[in-house]
Image: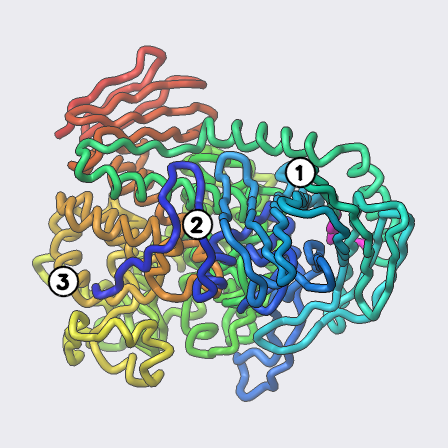
Amino acid sequence: MKKYADIYFTVDPWKIIEEGFDARYSRVSESVFSLANESVGVRGCFDEGGSVDSLRGAYTNGVYEYDHIGRSYRGIIDTTHFMIPSAEWLLVELRLDGERLDLGKSRFRDFRRELDLRCGTLRRSFVWQTASGKELRLSFLRFLDMTCRERAYQRITMEPLNFSGELTLSASLSFDVVHEGRGACFWGDTRAERSGGRLSMSASTVESGQQVFAGALLDMPEDAVCTHEGRTLRLTGRYALEQGTVRRMDRRAVILFNGSEGDELWQQGQRALDESARVSLDEALLAQRAYWDAYWAVSDVQIQSADPAAAAVVAAEQQGIRFCIFQLAQTYNGGSMRHNIGAKGLTGEAYNGHAFWDTESCCLPFYLFTDPAAARDLLLFRYRTLPQAIRRARELDCEGACYPVATLNGDEACPLWQHASLQLQPSTAVAYGIWHYVRLTGDTAFLRDYGAEMLLQIARFLKSRVARSPRSGKYGFYGVMGPDEFHLMVNNNAYTNYMGSRSLSYAARVMDELRERDPAAAAELAEKTGYTEQEAAAWREIAENMAFPMTEDGLIEQHDGYFDLPHTDIASIPVSEFPLYEHWSYDRIYRTDMIKQPDVLMMLYLYNSSFPESVKRINYDFYQPRTIHESSLSPAIHSILAAELGNMDEALRFFGYATRLDLDNYNRNTREGLHITSIAMAWANIVYGFAGLRSDGEVLRFAPHLPPRWAQLCFALTYRGSVIRVCMERGATRFRLEKGAPVPLLLYGEERTLGPDGLLVAEK
């Protein structure tokens, strides 16, 4: 793997720090310094705007617009939807002696920007040196409220160092925002009002008709002047600055999008502003710190170095994993089952804000072990959008429910037929997510009320999509694209067949158990869906006779004919040709045995307990050298399996890539936004990789192996109401029960029970 770190940020255990400003990294920094609270998000763009290269983006989760692309063939979508930038609530303009602050043109010194992971704040400071020789120290603070998620805050502090004079400051609230990729604003006419320092606006998207309210309380001079131009309200005030005296402007913003329209949303916005007015920025900042203190108390991962020579590397790993955990908390925390986890979260417009099958396969475990209620809400998003999945299956001439490859609202939004029509992994990932959630939480009520219906419809889809070979008599999926995505229209993709088989057998078992445990609920579901017991029998028959291409020594063929493909030496590809999608013709990618991301290995990760070590080893050794890691999910999966197989050097190498993928811009595309689902896998890399957790068996399994350069690794997991603290040290691991009932565990294959006295287990 020729990709390498592009190191820019200062290493610190709790902060991401930019010392000095390099305009070449402007967009990378904007992505890394993004803030969000699930409901709203904002890139780390400069408050004052200017001529510096920037993707200026403030986003409201769930807000999208339509794009009509025209229908070509049945099954290919004719309308897609995409996330658009929402109300701009940060923008200010500062003028001193007629000169406008613009870091692309202005002189400045002592630039520093830092994201504090302990309290979710972004601070930036520098000294502005005007053409007339005046020096003004400016500090900018922003944060998004993690509990009252419609609230956002900004503070600008001004300190004249060598002069007294007058500064003009304008603060805007605007829906005049442009989607960069499409070069257009998708907001229609606005409603706007001003009362003193209180600004209120609302606007609707042009076609989807979604309405957002944006308001702001601005602490500005009483004689500030308001202007209303188009979709923008601007308040301008003059500040009399005295040398050595600090002045400041606070903004408390409110952004609402909750399905209400017209006067109802407007009135909700006014009430939200009234409530925000009762809380000062300083009080909100204290509450913000309390929120993050509580969060880190149960979610932190702590790494200590064993060797002074490796201290710098370990410090970077510590910073990296905390950055990942922080971004996961920002992106999703179970606030609404209207939301899913977009591949870029609320950090950029790439991938159009869409969520993929990564949610259930890669992100769900983090929430299962840190916030099970949020994990439940993630799956409820899939239940809420079940009608669209049923409709999508019909479009593909199938039955049941086919979940979308890419979506914001539950509709398929991917216009590429080879992905939207050939990838079955979104549906099998939902089935896997339900299975994993119920296994870990014991929430049979969820299974009864929601999960069983989703499984039933997924099984119907798989049954209608599968076919039987006239030669072998085995079932298989034909004309598909597996997780690899570098091979399309293949037959009997091993991952697709195996996940389909497990989904079908699980759906049949759930329906049988529901009938035995709760006959009334089973009868109600059967009446609602037309389910018959013969369906479960058919699902079992298919599952038991599914083709699974594997040699006698355990090597699994990725799909029919894969072993016959021409070989590409991926080490020979110059780093300048990454990402491949931007440098290779599309069809060239599909003509070799090169793999984009784990396919067979992904299956061995998800259902790890179902395969012996010998099968994992032979497949890892075969597929790892063929994998180009063009997907950000890839390194962590490889690291986890490498650690299990005892290849710690390789596990650490992949871990360093996974945990600092965005901080060190490994894929050279951090500028587009963060890789949120990859960030989730970095956490999994810790607990599933080095701690050896496996959660697909009857009880939790651990086989900890501490990397040589680490002296200690500590983290906590929530499991069925209990909190388990795991602390790995050289030669032994201590398990402590911090809360809840005793928990049965398998430690290096030995049955143990974790109780109040804890357990100390020697490394094997």
* Disc 2 packing (10 Å; few <14; some 14–19; many ≥20): some
- Can residue 350 be seen at all in this image of the molecule? yes
Give me the residue at 76% from left, 62% from top. Answer: 174
Residue 240 in the figure: left or right of residue 484: right
Give me the residue at 50% from left, 67% from top. Answer: 351
According to the picture, the residue beneath numbered tag 1 turns out to be 244
Magenta range: 254-260
726 is within the stretch colored magenta: no
Residue 3 in the figure: left or right of residue 762: right
Which three-letter amino acid code belongs to the residue tagged 2? Glu
According to the picture, the residue beneath numbered tag 3 turns out to be 622
**Position of 198 relative to 485 (above/below):** above
**Position of 25 relative to 720 (above/below):** below
Q: Residue 726: image x %, image y %? A: 32, 26
**Position of 135 relative to 424 (above/below):** above
Callout in the foreground (2, 1): 1
Q: Residue 44: image x %, image y %? A: 55, 55
Callout in the foreground (3, 2): 2
Q: What's the distance in space between the residues labelled 2 and 1, CA to CA?
A: 25 Å
Q: Residue 606: image x %, image y %? A: 32, 50
Rendering quarter of residue 609? top left
Callout in the foreground (3, 1): 1
Rendering quarter of residue 546? bottom left
Give me the residue at 35% from left, 47% from top. Answer: 682
Where disc 2 sits, the SS reads strand
Residue placed most toward the observer, 682 or 103? 103
Q: Tags 3 and 1 in contact by the CB under 8 Å rule?
A: no
Where disc 1 sits, the SS reads loop
Q: What's the distance in space between the residues labelled 3 and 2, CA to CA?
A: 44 Å
Residue 58 in the figure: left or right of residue 543: right
Residue 19 is tagged as: 2
Image quarter where the N terminus lies is bottom left
